[in-house]
Image (tube, rainbow, N blue to C red):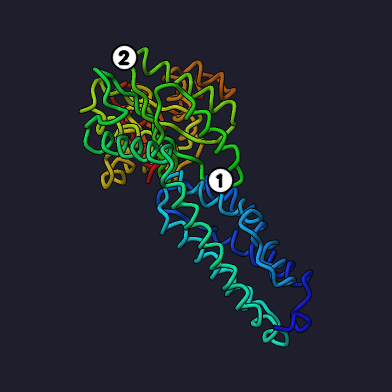
């Protein structure tokens, strides 16, 4: 191939940068078992490395060495360590490459299309080389005892969460378990901080971590009482989250024995998802602090019917609903509500009376105030 007939390197680089920007807006690469926040933050690092290596290959005709391409293969190894399978890692690399190449060609000026297409053999050869290096490195590391130990731990955590059977590293004499399920915010600009948070949590003693698409599951075993075990892990998680600054939510639940872990996992997952959907200000959510919210989310198809209890507020002055929400947040204290809203207490009483008239539920009666609270949550979740 005559390199003099190809578009200039600067033009190719600029075009590739545009393609990568397009791919970012499309959502970037996805994995079945690894949270997007742990993939996308280093995706662009990998793309930049690949573009530089590919352009060098096109310019010189000399394939970069395995040592020069090691940063790229290390990114693939990180995906494997985080729970993705080798076919998924290689398939994702091939799909991303194909998507970017198709976009590159479609954005090429017709007058330069033939020249751009002359790059195709080089692109194909480069991708084949990278895939081979990834597969070779994965095979080499599969024989590493640390890899085998990691796989055993992962299988033990899966079995505990799904069946309630403690095996391998989790087969401990009479432990109790605390399960924390993380739900990340979905923001890809906090990727490096997410990796730092993950590392901090993995360093906690007597903890195993399993990745999921929305975040991860933390399994902590302890011989302490329920209160001590939950409080201890909660404090460590809060310290780790505070240090990293990652926006996320964690549902937390306790199991007195291995057999109760699947139920605790279900509850913690529900709490995390509910806290995320409601955009709760607190990082850690437990059942005691979110009972109504959790039950509301668990009601599923019945949410619209519950939300209809406050349907009468929708067409009314928004100040009535705002006053009701503030009243509930202030533990049904009218004076505290008036102070927070900077109005006279009589104004609060009047507005709550309007809520009663519009909904048929009196917020000054505890049971009916609880119903109003549940209905507002149901509407927020609908």
Q: Which residue is mark 2?
A: 223
Res. 1 image quadrant: bottom right
Q: Residue at x 36, y 43 (%)?
A: 311
Count neighbours of disc 2 (C-alpha within 10 A) and say few if under 14, some if 14 to 19, many if 20 or more: some
> In the picture, residue 98 is in which quadrant?
bottom right
Where residue 236 sits in the image (x, y, percent)? Answer: 48, 21
The mark that comes first in sequence, 2 or 1, is 1
Does 182 sit above or below residue 139? above
Q: Above or below — where is 301 with respect to 194?
A: below
Indicate the position of residue 8 as horizontal and vertical percent values: 78, 75
193 vs 58, left or right, is: left
Q: Image quadrant of residue 146? A: top left
**What percent of the width, then of the height, locates residue 126?**
60, 68
- Which residue lies at the image location 38% right of the left edge and 23% below the top edge? 289
| Label drawn at residue 210 | none
Residue 114 placement, left or right of 205: right
Q: Secondary structure at mark 2?
A: loop
Residue 130 location (% of width, % of height): 56, 62
User: Disc 1 on helix, strand or loop?
Assistant: loop
Q: Are marks 2 and 1 in contact (CB under 8 Å)?
A: no
Q: Which residue is mark 1?
A: 187
Please say whether residue 175 is visible from this viewpoint: yes
Along the line of sight, the residue nearer the viewer: 369 or 53 = 53
State whether residue 336 is above or below residue 293. above
Q: For this rendering, which residue is in front, 346 or 299?
A: 299
């Amino acid at each position: 191939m005559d390199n003099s007939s190809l578009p200039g390197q600067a033009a190719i680089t600029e075009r590739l940068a545009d393609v990568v920007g397009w791919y970012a807006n499309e959502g970037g690469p996805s994995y079945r078992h690894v949270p997007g926040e742990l993939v996308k933050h280093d995706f662009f690092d990998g793309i930049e490395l690949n573009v530089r290596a590919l352009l060098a290959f096109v310019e010189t005709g000399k394939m970069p060495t395995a040592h020069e391409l090691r940063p790229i293969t290390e990114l693939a190894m990180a995906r494997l360590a985080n729970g993705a399978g080798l076919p998924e890692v290689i398939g994702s690399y091939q799909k991303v490459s194909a998507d970017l190449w198709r976009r590159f060609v479609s954005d090429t000026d017709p007058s330069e299309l033939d020249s751009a297409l002359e790059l195709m053999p080089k692109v194909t050869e480069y991708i084949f080389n990278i895939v081979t290096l990834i597969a070779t490195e994965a095979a080499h590391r599969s024989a590493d005892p640390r890899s085998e130990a990691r796989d055993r731990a992962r299988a033990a955590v899966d079995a505990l969460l799904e069946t309630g059977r403690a095996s391998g590293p989790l087969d401990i004499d009479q432990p109790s378990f605390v399960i924390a399920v993380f739900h990340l915010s979905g923001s890809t600009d906090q990727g490096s901080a997410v990796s730092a948070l993950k590392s901090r949590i993995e360093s906690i003693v007597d903890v195993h971590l399993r990745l999921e698409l929305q975040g991860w599951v933390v399994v902590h075993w302890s011989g302490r009482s329920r209160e001590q075990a939950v409080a201890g892990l909660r404090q460590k998680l809060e310290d780790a989250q505070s240090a990293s600054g990652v926006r996320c939510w964690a549902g937390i639940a306790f199991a007195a024995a291995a057999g109760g872990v699947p139920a605790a996992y279900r509850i913690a997952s529900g709490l995390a998802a509910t806290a995320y959907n409601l955009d709760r200000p607190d990082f850690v959510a437990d059942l005691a602090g979110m009972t109504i919210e959790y039950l509301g989310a668990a009601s599923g198809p019945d949410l619209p019917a519950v939300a209809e209890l406050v349907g009468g507020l929708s067409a009314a002055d928004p100040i009535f609903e705002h006053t009701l929400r503030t009243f509930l947040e202030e533990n049904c204290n009218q004076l505290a509500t008036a102070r927070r809203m900077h109005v006279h207490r009589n104004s609060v009483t009047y507005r709550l009376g309007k809520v009663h008239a519009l909904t048929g539920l009196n917020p000054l009666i505890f049971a009916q105030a609880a119903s109003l609270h549940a209905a507002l949550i149901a509407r927020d979740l609908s």
